[in-house]
Image (tube, coloured by chain):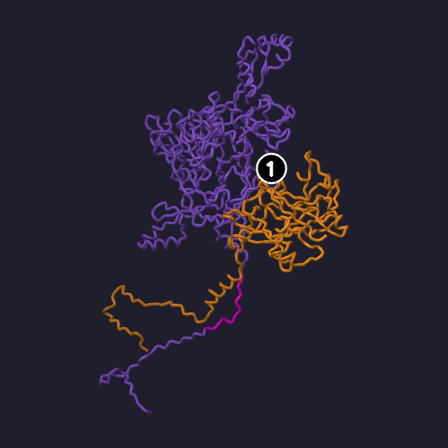
Chain colours: A orange, B purple
């Protein structure tokens, strides 16, 4: 076999003559082993590693309807009066956006005056869900706010009011601007990433209010509307976007400031104004949420 | 067969053509490549993945607490400010006997039931009120809605040169650490020369220094000042104090002298002189008070009952591609805390009162530039804690002293700035490390105190202000304690005659020379490796902190001291002799003077100069006589001596209301709260 035969004359070969012999090292894969190692395996390894999820939470501050931050707000609770239940015609004490009194829950004056365990261990639980449908929603978080003996529960001399005048109310304030108020429940803590990546940077959740009475162990369901026929309960009246049970809460990134506000539906707004976090121009009473007992 | 073709072995048919063997290469290709038959197992290391992600991340999240140590010894006046019956804002002087200190704050206890109604609704009997500036202007957590301090994350991005010593020779910091005094030191019956530097010299015993612009007093110039490097014999003066500012050389004092202003020293390491400069800081956060949340820390109270403030930066800090002043990747960030000079609630009666007191001053002084907002505070100035010498610039403690009127300082600093002048550092190319010599201090005072004499010509300026260090170190990475062996690429370049710049660049990469390596001569490099997070070197150096959600979480625990500029540590008692009575004080001049002295913050006590005279008046002057010195109506002369305390600091900064805590107050009069409430 003659392959590229060259004739080299002896006379041409002198001292130090070199002959270039090309050696090629082109790689020709004979099967897919390399490809599998280099691409397939690496790709599969990459797929098996879960992406980084940002669990950073930030503080959200409450705001009014114009997204102006409010330093403090009040939660009023209104229950069916024992007398009206006994009479067979359950009715709430308050006629407007006002609270009931601790007498309605069968507390006595000594409970408030002495801060008995059954009084101070009673609390409201504000639970937050992803949707307003109880069959499919998920609990996101909750906050417990314990009973207070604040300025509203005291007379001008600083003593607790009589039990039939002591309002069931909870004032929540900014820990910096309102250092004298209770702060638990004022801030809302949620994932920054989720809010930042929603349209308009607004994220919706839904809240339910319950009162846990340590005196009798009962949990009272509360709604942000009083217009409710206790003798003819319809699930649609309670749940969904227009139900009274769930109160819509919007979390927002407002140019780097994280806020939340309560947005009532038409039913909750009807009568009386149960969700009114707009500032009171006359001063005095802070913006107020009022909840009414749903079932006697 | 339809057709027969004849194939010639050669191209043409000639008699001389003979058959030859021809070969044709035939390639065999198979597109259906087989899969390996064996199982392919790969183990993914969770820890390995964690390390990889942590190494790749340049995102930092900062949170933590600031423990403030703050009080108001530099108050405007000992005034109680309230709305009078006509709704006018009024300031009443609290007499010296009513001034109290509570947890370091100076103020008064409300003891007048009528005044409680006149004051805010929140006040109550025996409630303590600090004098202005009070809680609302100084505390870290402020409930008036306007934060008193602005937090930022900054990094050193460039350097600058300054003139520490006043001189006409153009000598600056870059020429070395200035020396201001020669000291003779005797050790073991031998005389040594010591030198005091204007700032911290950064030397240790055994350090080597070069002396620049000193005077060789030997007849034969045997000191060889320009050629010889001297070893530091010891630090400190004759009694081993001031070690940071005094160093001693083994030279006889009469052989050497200095020329203040131009004489400098430079530390030398392996023949390399250190460089000295000021680092400048640039902000990595730009949204002001919305970059972070500030709130009370749980159970957070300092030893001095200051509320600890917790913070959480909402803004992530990305340090990718950011280089420091030496062109290196960022290893140090700083938490800057800068006083907000516009921290007043304009609706508070206190703010309105003090605004009205400065209304006769020039608007260029009292108004924030470009706005109609009235200033409570002066703009921020800055400098360093340097030696007390009038020839020195940037001595922050001297700010306002008329003897330093021509001194230089950093001026017109505002918390909203994005760049700030920072610390003085030393960098030595042999060590490849920066060492901080002096922290920068910010200084602020109230407009009222600073210009009091202009406001009321009967009063003396109170030019002592508050100072604080604004920049708190955050060590996010550390350089290794080992310097990499010097890489000499030039030898390789010369050996193989490499001329293509791309080839040289490839060569650098192959030797893993980082882009921040120092080129000590052409194509000769040395550097320190930047330790990865979680990696420590042989001396324990390195950082380690949590990595979560793709970001590094760095917890900061910082203390913030708001200090007096020049706390007086000395005092003297001064007396004023006053004669009261219808004869010697017919126009009540002394009576008014006495009332004024009783209200002075430095008032201590009074005594009767003549016991017999006083005894006679006890019997004869009646209840409105000697028993009521505030309105003495006695016909007979009464001579009294009023004693006041004169507090003295190191600088002439006007009147001092309160002495520094370095004074032993037990020698002075003290009162208990029971005296009032």
Q: Residue farthest to the right?
A: A86
- Magenta-drawn stretch, dominant element (helix, strand or loop): loop
Relative depth, front residue between B667 and B245: B667
Residue that badge 1 annotates? B301
What x and y, as percent, mark residue A114? Answer: 73, 39
Q: How many labels does the image show?
A: 1
The reply, left or right, for residue B411 in relation to residue B73 is: left
**Mark 1 Cα within 10 Å, few/some/many (few <14, many 20+)?**
some
| Residue for point 59% across, 39% down | A283
Whether residue B106 can be seen here: no
Q: Where is residue B110 in the image (x, y as percent from the top left)?
A: 62, 28
Q: In this orientation, does residue B388 appear?
A: yes
Task: Please provide percent x and percent y for residue B557.
Answer: 55, 41
Q: Which of B289 and A263 is in front in this view?
A: A263
Provide the residue span drawn in magenta: B33-43
Reply yes or no: does residue B40 show up in magenta.
Answer: yes
Classify the position of the N terminus of chain B by image quarter: bottom left
Q: Residue furthest bottom?
A: B1
Q: Is residue B381 left or right of residue B305?
A: left
Q: Position of residue B638 (x, y in %)?
A: 58, 10
Please indicate whether residue B111 sits to the left or right of residue B269 in the image. Answer: right
| Residue at 43% across, 70% down | A29
Which quadrant does the C terminus of chain B fall into? top right
Position of residue B524 relative to residue A151, above or below, is below
């Amino acid at each position: 076999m003659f392959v590229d035969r060259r004739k080299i004359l002896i006379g041409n070969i002198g001292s130090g003559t070199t002959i270039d012999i090309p050696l090629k090292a082109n790689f020709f894969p004979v099967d897919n082993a390399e490809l599998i190692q280099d691409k397939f395996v690496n790709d599969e390894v990459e797929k098996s590693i879960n992406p980084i999820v940002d669990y950073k939470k930030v503080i959200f501050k409450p705001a009014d309807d114009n997204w102006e931050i409010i330093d403090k707000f009040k939660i009023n609770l209104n229950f069916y009066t024992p007398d009206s239940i006994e009479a067979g015609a359950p009715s709430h004490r308050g006629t407007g956006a006002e609270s009931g009194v601790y007498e309605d829950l069968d507390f006595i004056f000594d409970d408030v005056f002495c801060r008995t365990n059954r009084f101070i261990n009673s609390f409201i639980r504000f639970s937050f869900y992803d949707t307003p449908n109880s069959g499919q929603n998920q609990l996101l978080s909750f906050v417990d706010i314990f009973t207070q003996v604040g300025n509203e529960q005291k007379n001008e001399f600083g003593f607790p009011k009589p039990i039939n005048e002591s309002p069931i109310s909870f004032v929540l304030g900014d820990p910096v601007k309102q250092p004298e108020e209770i702060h638990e429940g004022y801030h809302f803590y949620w994932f920054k990433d989720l809010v930042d990546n929603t349209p308009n940077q607004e994220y919706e959740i839904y809240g339910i209010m319950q009162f846990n009475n340590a005196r009798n162990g009962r949990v009272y369901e509360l709604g942000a509307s009083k217009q409710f026929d206790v003798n003819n309960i319809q699930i649609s009246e309670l749940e969904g976007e227009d139900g009274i049970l769930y109160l819509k809460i919007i979390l927002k990134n407002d140019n780097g400031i994280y806020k939340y506000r309560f947005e009532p539906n038409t039913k909750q707004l009807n009568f009386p104004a149960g969700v009114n976090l707009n500032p009171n121009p006359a001063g005095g009473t802070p913006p107020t949420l009022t909840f009414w007992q749903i079932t006697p | 067969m339809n057709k027969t073709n004849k194939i010639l072995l050669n191209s043409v048919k000639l008699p001389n053509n003979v058959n030859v063997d021809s070969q044709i290469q035939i390639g065999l290709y198979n597109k259906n490549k087989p899969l390996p038959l064996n199982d392919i197992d790969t183990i993914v290391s969770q820890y390995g993945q964690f390390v990889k992600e942590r190494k790749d991340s340049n995102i930092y999240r900062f949170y933590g607490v600031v423990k403030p140590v703050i009080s108001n010894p530099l108050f405007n006046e000992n005034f109680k400010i309230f709305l009078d019956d006509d709704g006018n804002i009024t300031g009443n002087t609290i007499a010296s006997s009513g001034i109290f200190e509570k947890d370091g704050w100076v103020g008064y206890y409300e003891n007048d039931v009528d005044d409680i109604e006149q004051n805010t609704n929140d006040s109550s009997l025996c409630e303590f009120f600090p004098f202005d500036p009070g809680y609302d202007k100084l505390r870290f957590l402020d409930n008036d809605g306007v934060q008193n301090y602005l937090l930022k994350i900054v990094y050193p991005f460039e350097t600058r040169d300054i003139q520490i010593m006043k001189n006409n020779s153009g000598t600056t910091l870059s020429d070395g650490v200035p020396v201001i005094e020669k000291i003779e030191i005797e050790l073991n019956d031998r005389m040594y020369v010591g030198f005091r530097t204007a700032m911290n010299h950064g030397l240790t015993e055994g350090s080597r220094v070069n002396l620049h612009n000193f005077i060789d007093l030997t007849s034969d110039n045997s000191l060889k000042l320009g050629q010889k490097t001297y070893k530091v014999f010891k630090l400190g003066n004759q009694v081993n104090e001031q070690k940071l500012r005094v160093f001693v050389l083994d030279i006889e004092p009469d052989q050497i002298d200095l020329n203040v202003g131009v004489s400098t020293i430079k530390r030398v390491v392996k023949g390399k002189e250190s460089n000295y400069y000021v680092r400048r800081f640039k902000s990595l956060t730009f949204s002001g008070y919305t970059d972070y949340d500030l709130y009370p820390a749980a159970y957070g109270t300092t030893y001095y009952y200051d509320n600890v403030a917790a913070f959480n930066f909402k803004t992530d800090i990305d340090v990718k591609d950011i280089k420091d002043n030496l062109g290196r990747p960022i290893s140090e960030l700083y938490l800057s805390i800068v006083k907000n000079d516009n921290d007043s609630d304009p609706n508070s009666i206190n703010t309105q009162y003090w605004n009205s007191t400065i209304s006769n001053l020039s608007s260029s002084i009292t108004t924030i530039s470009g706005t109609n907002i009235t200033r409570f505070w002066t703009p921020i100035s800055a400098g360093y804690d340097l030696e007390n010498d009038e020839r020195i610039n940037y001595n922050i403690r001297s700010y306002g002293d008329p003897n330093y009127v021509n001194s230089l300082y950093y001026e017109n600093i505002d918390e909203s700035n994005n760049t700030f002048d920072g610390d003085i550092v030393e960098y030595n190319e042999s060590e490849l490390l920066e060492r901080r010599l002096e922290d920068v201090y910010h200084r602020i005072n109230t407009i009222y105190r600073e210009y009091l004499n202009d406001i009321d010509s009967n009063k003396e300026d109170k030019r002592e202000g508050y100072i604080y260090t604004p920049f708190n170190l955050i060590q996010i990475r550390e350089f290794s304690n080992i310097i990499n062996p010097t890489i000499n690429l030039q030898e390789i370049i010369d050996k193989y005659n490499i001329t293509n710049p791309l080839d040289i660049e490839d060569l650098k990469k192959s030797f893993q020379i980082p882009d921040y390596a120092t080129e000590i001569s052409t194509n000769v490099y040395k550097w320190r490796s930047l330790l990865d997070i979680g990696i420590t070197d042989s001396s324990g150096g390195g950082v380690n902190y949590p990595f979560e959600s793709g970001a590094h979480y760095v917890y900061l625990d910082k203390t913030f001291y708001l200090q007096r500029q020049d706390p007086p540590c000395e005092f003297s008692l001064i007396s004023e002799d006053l004669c009261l009575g219808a004869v010697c004080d017919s126009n009540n001049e002394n009576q008014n003077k006495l009332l004024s002295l009783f209200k002075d913050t430095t008032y201590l006590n009074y005594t009767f100069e003549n016991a017999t005279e006083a005894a006679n008046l006890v019997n004869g002057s009646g209840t409105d006589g000697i028993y009521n010195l505030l309105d003495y109506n006695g016909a007979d002369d009464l001579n009294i001596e009023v004693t006041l305390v004169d507090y003295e600091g190191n600088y002439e900064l006007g009147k001092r209301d309160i002495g520094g805590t370095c004074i032993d107050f037990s020698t002075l009069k003290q009162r208990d709260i029971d005296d009032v409430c």
